[in-house]
């Protein structure tokens, strides 16, 4: 197995580790090779801002899976290895547009509760999933919850990712203001294993390392969707953006470099946990295809198609052309919670026990109101 570095997208202090970590400020910081998402797709995508006091705030992406529940990456709710953001430090918007001026504070839905997975570790990003319970439900006119895909998939299954990444890798304040999206390709089990020593085929999905297309800084927790043919919902949530890896041939840790895979939390592995923690009916939050894909012998991921794109991959754009059935634009509801007020931020499923950082989280970009701080 090739020894690789796990690259993170959250610039925080490092603890001693045998795993080489690529400095975050040397990585490109955006959805790579993508375009602005159309107004009728990703109607469940959430923009998250976490206020850290003073003029500093961090950000991630998430997905609305119930009127008052957002799923995101576990590492997005941590500002250090051991310290979580409190519920009162979050603002959530179901929107395609975000403020571009550093002097404008984002106002959205307030968060009542933050729930990380009890086994989440900042050391290797195992079980990289968390829930935000909103103080009030998002109305139908403000966003459309997306269901979690629980069916089979192969390396030919079309996938599309979205996020609020930066637009200039050299400028940490370069917020595009628009949700970006990119079509990707699922990597084989052998590719995923060779690029990450901690890869778990049951709980993670990786991309095939195609050059020029990738998720990156600012996209953590964002949706990885796939088309479905079951009911009015045209896409389902296959995973969420977690982290990226680099090989010795990419020592600077640049995103979208050939052979460097992106890794995504496979949400079907957590659908029961999500339902229990958010007090939801599991049957209401998951979906599969009427015509299911048949996984290969390589544990849902075929090696033979890892080196070249299939005809299915080459037509991803047309597959995702009209992603969601509702063409209505979504507006961000303003429900500002004072940062000075208290809120129940205790998780019911335990604390993270990560001791140091061999892997930095794949985003939560620090955005300062008057100056950028990492």
Image (cartoon, rainbow, N blue to C red):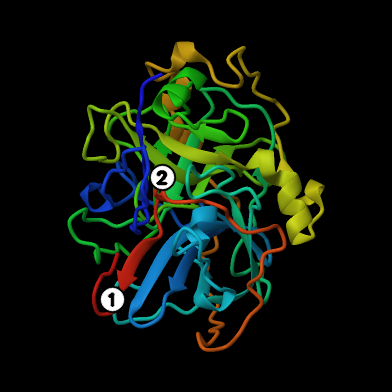
Mark 1: give few (<14), some (14-19) or many (20+) Cα within 10 Å.
Answer: some
- Residue ID for mark 2: 359
Residue found at x 40% / y 80%: 53
Q: Which residue is mark 1?
A: 101
Helix, strand or loop under label 2:
loop
Please give the name of the residue rendered at 67% of the width and 58% of the height, measured from the top-left corner: 350
Q: Distance between the Cα atoms at labels 1 and 2? A: 31 Å
Q: Nearer the viewer, mark 1 or mark 2?
A: 2
Q: Secondary structure at mark 1?
A: loop
Tell me the residue at 40%/44% (across/down). 358
User: Measured along the vertical axis of the image, is residue 254 above or below residue 62?
Assistant: above
Query: Could you say where residue 83 lies in the image, as x and y percent from the top left?
Result: 50, 66
Instruction: Tell me the quadrant of the picture where the N terminus can be found.
Output: top left
Picture layout, residue 57 above or below residue 249: below
Picture coordinates of residue 142, whole percent (x, y): 59, 69
**Does label 1 or label 2 sit earlier along the sequence?**
1
In this view of the protein, can residue 73 be seen by the observer?
A: no
Check the image and name the residue furthest to the front.
Answer: 16
For label 2, the crowd category at 10 Å Cα-Cα, with few meaning under 14, some 14 to 19 and many 20 or more, is many
Residue 282, image x, y percentages: 79, 48
In the picture provided, is 163 more to the left or to the right than 247?
right
Q: Is residue 137 above or below residue 260?
A: below
Quarter of the image for the C terminus: give it: bottom left
In this view of the protein, can residue 66 be seen by the observer? yes
> Compared with residue 336, is residue 50 higher up or lower down, i.e. above or below?
above
Tell me which corner region of the image, top left, top right, bottom left or bottom right, holds residue 115: bottom right
């Amino acid at each position: 197995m090739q020894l690789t570095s796990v690259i993170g997208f959250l610039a925080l202090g490092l603890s001693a580790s045998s795993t080489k970590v690529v400095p975050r400020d040397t990585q490109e910081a955006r959805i790579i090779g993508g375009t602005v998402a159309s107004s009728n797709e990703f109607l469940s995508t959430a923009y998250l801002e976490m206020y850290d006091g003073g003029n500093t705030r961090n950000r991630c992406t998430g997905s609305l899976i119930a009127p008052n529940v957002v799923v995101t990456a576990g590492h997005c709710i941590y500002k250090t290895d051991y310290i979580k953001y409190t519920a009162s430090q979050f603002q959530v918007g179901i929107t395609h547009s975000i403020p571009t001026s550093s002097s404008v504070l984002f106002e959205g839905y307030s968060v009542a509760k933050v729930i990380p997975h009890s086994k989440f570790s900042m050391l290797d990003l195992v079980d990289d999933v968390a829930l935000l319970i909103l103080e009030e439900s998002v109305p139908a006119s403000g966003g459309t919850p997306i269901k979690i895909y629980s069916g089979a998939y192969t390396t030919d299954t079309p996938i599309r990712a979205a996020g609020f990444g930066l637009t200039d890798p050299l400028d940490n304040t370069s917020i595009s203001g628009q949700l970006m999206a990119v079509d990707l390709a699922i990597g084989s089990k052998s590719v995923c294993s060779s690029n990450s020593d901690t890869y778990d085929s049951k709980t993670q999905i990786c991309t095939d390392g195609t050059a020029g297309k990738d998720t990156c800084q600012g996209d953590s927790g964002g949706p990885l969707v796939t088309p479905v043919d079951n009911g009015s919902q045209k896409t389902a949530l296959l995973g969420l953006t977690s982290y990226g890896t680099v090989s010795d041939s990419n020592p600077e840790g640049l995103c979208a470099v050939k052979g460097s895979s992106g890794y995504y939390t496979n949400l079907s592995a957590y659908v029961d946990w999500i339902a229990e923690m958010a007090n939801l009916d599991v049957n209401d939050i998951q979906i599969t295809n009427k015509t299911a894909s048949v996984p290969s012998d390589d544990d849902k991921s075929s090696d033979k198609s890892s080196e070249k794109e299939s005809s299915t991959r080459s037509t991803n754009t047309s597959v995702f052309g009209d992603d969601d059935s509702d063409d209505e634009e979504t507006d961000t509801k303003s429900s500002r919670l004072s940062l000075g007020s208290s809120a129940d931020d205790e998780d019911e499923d335990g604390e993270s026990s990560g001791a140091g950082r061999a892997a930095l989280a794949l985003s939560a970009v620090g955005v300062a109101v008057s100056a950028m701080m990492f």
